Amino acid sequence: MDPVRIAVREAVHILSSSKDGGCIFSTLESLKHYLGGTENPALPGEQEEFARVHFSAFLRCLVGKLSPDWLELLPNGQLEELWASFFLEGPADQAFLVLMEALEGTAGPSFRLMKMARLLARFLSEGRMAAVMEGQCRQQTELSFPLLQEALLMKVVSLPDRLGNCLQHENLAEFFPQNYFPLLGEEAVRVLQAVVDSLRGGLDCSVSFVSQVLGKVCVYGRQKEILGVLVPRLTALTQGSCLWQRVCWRLLECVPDRAVEAVLTGLVEAAPGPEVLSRLLGNLVMKSKKAQFVMTQKLLFLQYRFTTPVLQSLLGYLAMDSQRRPLLVQALKELLETWGSSSAIRHAPLPQQCYVSKAVLICLAHLGDMELQDSRDELLASLMAGVKCRLDSSLPAVRRLGMIVAEVASARIHPEGPPLKFQYVEDELSREMLALATPQPAADSPLETGPSVAAEIPDKQTVGGGVPQVPPQGSDSELDSDDEFVPYDMSGDQELKSGKVPMYIRDCLEALTTSEDWERWEAALQALEGLVFRSPAATREVSVELAKVLLHLEEKTSVVGFEGLRQRALVAVTVTDPARVAEYLTSQFYAINYSLRQRMDILDVLTLAAQELSRPGRLGRASPCGSLGAASQPRCAGAASWRAVVDERIRGKTRRFSKGASRQGPAGSPNEFNSVAGYFFFPLIQGFDRPLVTFDLLGDDQLVLGKLVHTLGILMYLAVNTTVAVSMGKALLEFVWALRFHGDTYVRRGLLSAVSCVLLSVPAERLLEDLPDELLEARSWLADVAEKDPDEDCRMLAVKALLLLEKLKDKLLPLSSP
């Protein structure tokens, strides 16, 4: 009979029946020589048979004997240490599986459960997990056991979850995910080091099991923990070592297809630059279709959460090798095609559009003129289509993206043509994108020294143009310096005018329409706002005519702030005679032969005038004093100053017995917008769906439509507590319902804001009495927008409107309850 089997059977019998600690200790010591760690180890064949046939069963027997009484059969923990040595010195894969099986099969909390948990923590701390993975790497070159490998893979990766379920509140820190997965990364590096040593010794070895562990950990969402350890270590090890690079490439090539995306995503984020990424990946994108799809499609078009350095690292990796550069050219074609798609502009959120725009500029910075030559026509067509669509957008940020990319890309794709140049407000994003378009010089480039130093330290003898100033001979700079002279304050000086400032409304009207004296024309424009507030009766006589003149007024001189002066004067006229001027302006909004700028001006004036009319206490404030020309300001200032002195003296001489508030609250006054809100609102909302010869709100003029929607929402909000608010709310909800699926983001934002304005302005009781069907329809639409709209601002506005609806319901529930 087999001596190994006899020895194991006798040992199991003694463990099961004996209570003698010495006998048990000697029995276990006799079996340890089959592990090969004693002075007189067993024969290699016997060791192999014990490990392959008997080891797991014997470990289960040891687990079954674990109890406080059994361990106390010998003093000083001798028996426990010998018991643990079988798990720590025997075949690591079997010991790990038995431990996990025993932990999951033990009802806790208990003595046995915690003893095995601490043993497993010791198992991990002594590097036995590396032995588990290394054993599988060596076995795959000889004899493969797929079921065993699958069981090991699942338990290695899911150990934190399994131990958390078993131990619950008694869980150990070693099993927390933030501690376990970095440890697993360290063990993986040790296994790879063993693989490298084996290859140097001429032995074959596989990294497939480590690849599977890495892939499954990343699929579980723990890329940062494991790659945060692996990437820095592999970055250092692969530098200058071709063998380490080959092992690393093989490690990533063996990752299963289902885990390629998770691994590459984490690796691109963790790698500090394209050089490191190229060293770790090699030409993986040329060998694996899955990796190519992830790197050139998924990470560029379907995800946009990555930072700019990550995007630079990804595209720089494609540019670093001649075999990969055709993929970069193809990526640029597809990026520009997406960038120029009108559908993508309408439906892609702004962060994704910024992401694609940055990718286009980075690709252009990496590619040379010869590489762009063959695709020039195709790239230029996509670019021009995108420029047209983006300049038509109603969002300033989208238009700015179009301008920046158009300037840079046109100069690179079509350098011999006239350069495109746009005017836009520079911000942090625009400066970042322009910096991306500049190719970075190499670290050893001579361009990094010399000129830059000279540019940073300008010569003291140069001026803005860069021309050196030669001091005249015989001059003493200290004596000739005029730094000690204080400049004369000329900030209060005014330019002298040959004509007089108009004193009457009709004089202003005449000067603006017929005068050829540009100084008089300018003086009339500057004085008009104050005259309107000072002479409201005279203004009402010519209000419509004056509004017409101001609406069509064009700048004839270089007067400072022309648009602001014109707008304020038009607002003042509208406030003074709101019904007639608003009726005129709203009729002109839908008239033919007006520019889009004039229509936008009409909406701005109506909004500002409505805000002024609805302001509380407007009638009681001294508006003329703040709006008159320069000639009348000193008088008002003087009156205010002497009145302040008198009030201060009265307060100083008065004895008060109460320290309550002495200042009275603002006197109540009617809302002037109440009686004229219909003149502002209803004519604007009635003709939006009637296309004109030069104006089509539902077609190409979506910028004006968005402005109209926002204006209607503001007018609705300003009509709070007015008698016409209910009718306005019903009309506005019908208007919103007709346009709720509009493709332009700016328009959708206005529609959502308008719904909130209706909920804020119309009394809750009237909403549920007069508009119940509209509210139900709006609720379902808002819920859909909050979940599915691509624009973040639209989703937030929809959520706010839904919250207002909930507050409305909660407000009315107490009233309806008995």
Image (cartoon, rainbow, N blue to C red):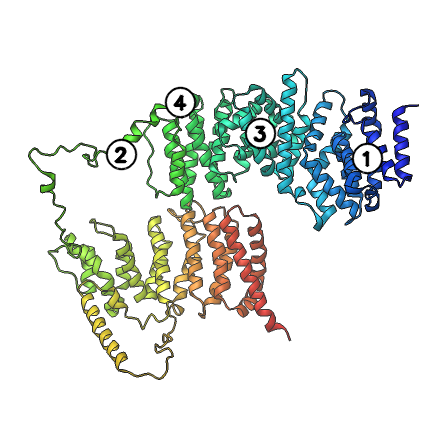
In the picture of the structure, the residue carrying the numbered disc 4 is 369
| Label 4 environment density (alpha carbons within 10 Å; few <14, some 14–19, many ≥20) | few
Q: CA distance from mark 2 to mark 4?
A: 34 Å
Q: Amino acid at mark 3?
A: Phe
Q: CA distance from mark 3 to mark 2?
A: 49 Å
Q: Considering the numbered disc 3 on the image, is that residue within a helix, a strand or a loop?
A: helix
Q: Amino acid at mark 1?
A: Leu
Q: Considering the numbered disc 4 on the image, is that residue within a helix, a strand or a loop?
A: helix
Q: Please name whichever residue, 474 or 299, is drawn nearer the observer in this view of the structure.
A: 474
Q: Amino acid at mark 4?
A: Asp
Residue mark closest to the camera, 4 vs 1: 1
Q: CA distance from mark 2 to mark 1?
A: 76 Å
**Disc number for residue 457:** 2
**The furthest residue to the top:** 202
In the picture of the structure, the residue carrying the numbered disc 3 is 293
- On screen, residue 657 versus residue 36, left or right, reads left
Q: Amino acid at mark 2?
A: Ile
- On screen, residue 143 versus residue 605, left or right, reads right
Residue mark closest to the camera, 3 vs 2: 2
